[in-house]
Amino acid sequence: MTDTDHWTSAPDRIAQGSLGLCHLSVFQAPFNIDARDLPPQDTERARAFVESFASVEEVLEELGPRSVQTALSSSVRSDLDIVHATAWGGMLAIADPAFADDGTGMPLLSSAERLRERFPDARIVGRVTCYGADHGGAEHTEDVVWLPDGAMFHACGRPGEEPFAVTGDPHAVVASLNLPGWALHNADIDLRAKPNEIEWFRVAGLALGRSDPWGWEELRATAFRVRHSASAVRSMEDLYFS
């Protein structure tokens, strides 16, 4: 199925931009569970999670299980209709090409804000890396961490370049997580560095800790083909085809 609602690009049009990391996790207590001990994937809950996002109008097709290490493809336009979602007990997660951005719309932050309203007692962690069709395919990152006590940070920009925007308080996030200095050192994180020199996805990874599911080949997500909203499609066309 290659539904083209809202798209002006043909399904087989080759994308100029590409994706790296692109996922958003909602993690409820207990926060010290090992990712390998998470319950089996619940496909129906995963589907409902996908359907709850404003960027998704409808799930068109279930495409079956995938390892969480299966990267989202962005080779051609039709790839951008596919999302991966998971529901393992107290953890919900989604990988969606619509989260990628060049800093103009910040869809990851918008989605995190909505999830914060729905799940105030959860840790919300999002990580996106993309290489847009503009700026010669330069890397753009967006990372967000939001904790139950309200501590949060959002970092967005092109690594090594200015401007690089950080809102919230990364130090408050580190304090709330009770992260020792050695943990930051081992993750090669120095919050005294310039914001555009910090690999913020590493801080986001520490917020998930041992429960970070994204590195385990054996953990399963479900792939869905969706119809994205008109605004999400406009943003993706600008990012991947401009």
Image (spheres, rainbow, N blue to C red):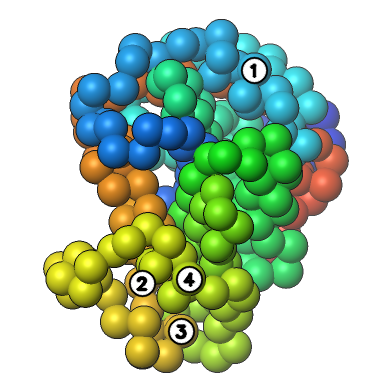
Badge 4: residue crowd in 10 Å (few <14, some 14–19, many ≥20) = some
Location of the C terminus by quadrant is: bottom right
Q: Give me the C-alpha separation between circle 3 and circle 2.
A: 9 Å
The x and y percentages for residue 215 are: 25, 40
Residue marked by disc 2: 199
Badge 2: residue crowd in 10 Å (few <14, some 14–19, many ≥20) = some
- Residue 48 is marked as 1
In primary-sequence order, the first of circles 4 and 3 is: 4
Is label 1 in a helix, a strand or a loop?
Answer: helix
Residue type at tag 1: Ala
Is label 2 in a helix, a strand or a loop?
Answer: loop
Q: Give me the C-alpha separation between circle 1 and circle 2.
A: 32 Å
Residue marked by disc 4: 172
- Residue 12 is marked as none
**In this view of the protein, which residue sits in the foreground, 149 or 54?**
149
In primary-sequence order, the first of circles 1 and 3 is: 1
